[in-house]
Image: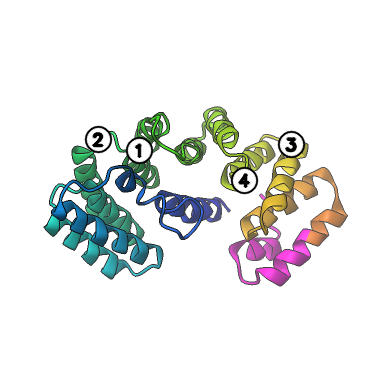
């Protein structure tokens, strides 16, 4: 089950690195748009970087890499292009190339909040959760960053991976205060409350999620197990029916079939 939950985190939070919960690409270009190009080379680099970001969001990795490299040929010191390389290599499961690209981006723009957030998430996904927190906090505390809820959420997820639920809850509650519609933070708060036996509180978190979005199989599976713990067999059966009907073949549906509730 944990692998499934962390997969949810990767999909949503990697999307958050490049676009704030949408396919617009706005987040990926935030640092660039805040600083207009100073010359023709930077302008060319920015254009190819933005094209590459859109290709990456579309899953066209090879073209994204090529656009990032064209951007760097126009301006070898264009940090966002290295950031794009890092994200794309990360998506391709090429950690050595991803880390090298992120480090080059940070050498050029050490205070960039988007790059700090992205490198932090890379570290978290590669077994260096403790180190990742400092990058998330550098991102979140940048007064010019418009979406600090993202790095606080990421810090919460990575704290869960370190089995530090107290720190995770603090980060996630901060993320939620900054953005009350942050369903990712709500999910992890529900997960922590469920594991700690605070089942009524966990139910409230999942109820809040369902008010904002159609539940994913991960959310539905968690809600089902919460209702099971609370002894609400009618609600448990309702979630089970929905999970079988809407998400056949999902890992959560298989766990339900196998009766693996924990």
Please give left or right for residue 114 compared with residue 76 in the image. right
Q: For mark 3, does the 10 Å Cα neighbourhood hold few (<14), some (14 to 19), or many (20 or more) residues? A: some
Q: Is residue 179 above or below residue 101?
A: above
Q: Secondary structure at mark 4?
A: helix
Please give left or right for residue 79 compared with residue 233 in the image. left
Circle nearer the N terminus (2, 3): 2
Disc 1 to disc 3, how far (Cα)? 33 Å
Residue at the spot of label 1: 113
Disc 1 to disc 4, how far (Cα)? 24 Å
State which quadrant residue 47 falls in: bottom left
Q: For mark 2, does the 10 Å Cα neighbourhood hold few (<14), some (14 to 19), or many (20 or more) residues? A: some
Disc 2 to disc 3, how far (Cα)? 40 Å
Give the extent of the magenta segment.
239-262
Circle nearer the N terminus (4, 3): 4
Disc 1 to disc 2, how far (Cα)? 8 Å
State which quadrant residue 71 falls in: bottom left
Residue 169 in the image, given as x and y percentages of width and height: 58, 32
Q: Secondary structure at mark 2?
A: loop
- Nearer the viewer's eye, disc 2 or disc 3? 2
Query: Was residue 26 drawn as part of the magenta stretch in this picture?
Result: no
- Nearer the viewer's eye, disc 1 or disc 4? 1
Residue at the spot of label 2: 110
Q: Is residue 45 above or below residue 180?
A: below
* Residue found 22% across the figure and 50% down from its top: 101
Q: Is residue 40 above or below residue 248?
A: above
The foreground one among 48 and 94 is: 48
Mark number displayed over residue 201: 3
């Amino acid at each position: 089950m944990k692998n499934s939950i962390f997969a949810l985190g990767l999909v949503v939070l990697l999307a958050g690195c490049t676009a704030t919960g949408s396919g617009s690409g706005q987040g990926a270009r935030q640092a660039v748009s805040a600083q207009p190009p100073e010359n023709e080379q930077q302008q060319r680099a920015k254009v190819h970087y933005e094209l590459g970001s859109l290709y990456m969001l579309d899953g066209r990795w090879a073209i994204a890499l090529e656009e990032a490299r064209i951007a760097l040929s126009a301006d070898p010191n264009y940090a966002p292009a290295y950031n794009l390389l890092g994200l794309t290599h990360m998506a391709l499961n090429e950690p050595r190339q991803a880390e090298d690209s992120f480090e080059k981006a940070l050498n050029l723009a050490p205070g960039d909040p988007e790059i700090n957030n992205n490198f932090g998430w890379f570290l978290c996904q590669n077994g260096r959760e403790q180190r990742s927190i400092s990058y998330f906090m550098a991102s979140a505390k940048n007064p010019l960053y418009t979406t600090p809820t993202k790095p606080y959420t990421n810090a919460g997820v990575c704290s869960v991976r370190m089995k530090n639920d107290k720190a995770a809850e603090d980060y996630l509650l901060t993320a939620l205060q900054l953005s009350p519609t942050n369903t990712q933070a709500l999910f992890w708060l529900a997960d922590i409350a469920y594991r700690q036996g605070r089942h009524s509180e966990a139910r409230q978190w999942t109820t809040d999620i369902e008010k904002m979005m159609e539940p994913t199989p991960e959310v539905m599976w968690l809600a089902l197990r919460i209702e099971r713990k609370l002894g609400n067999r009618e609600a448990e059966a309702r979630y089970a029916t929905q999970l079988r009907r809407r998400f056949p073949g999902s890992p959560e549906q298989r766990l339900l079939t196998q009766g693996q509730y924990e």
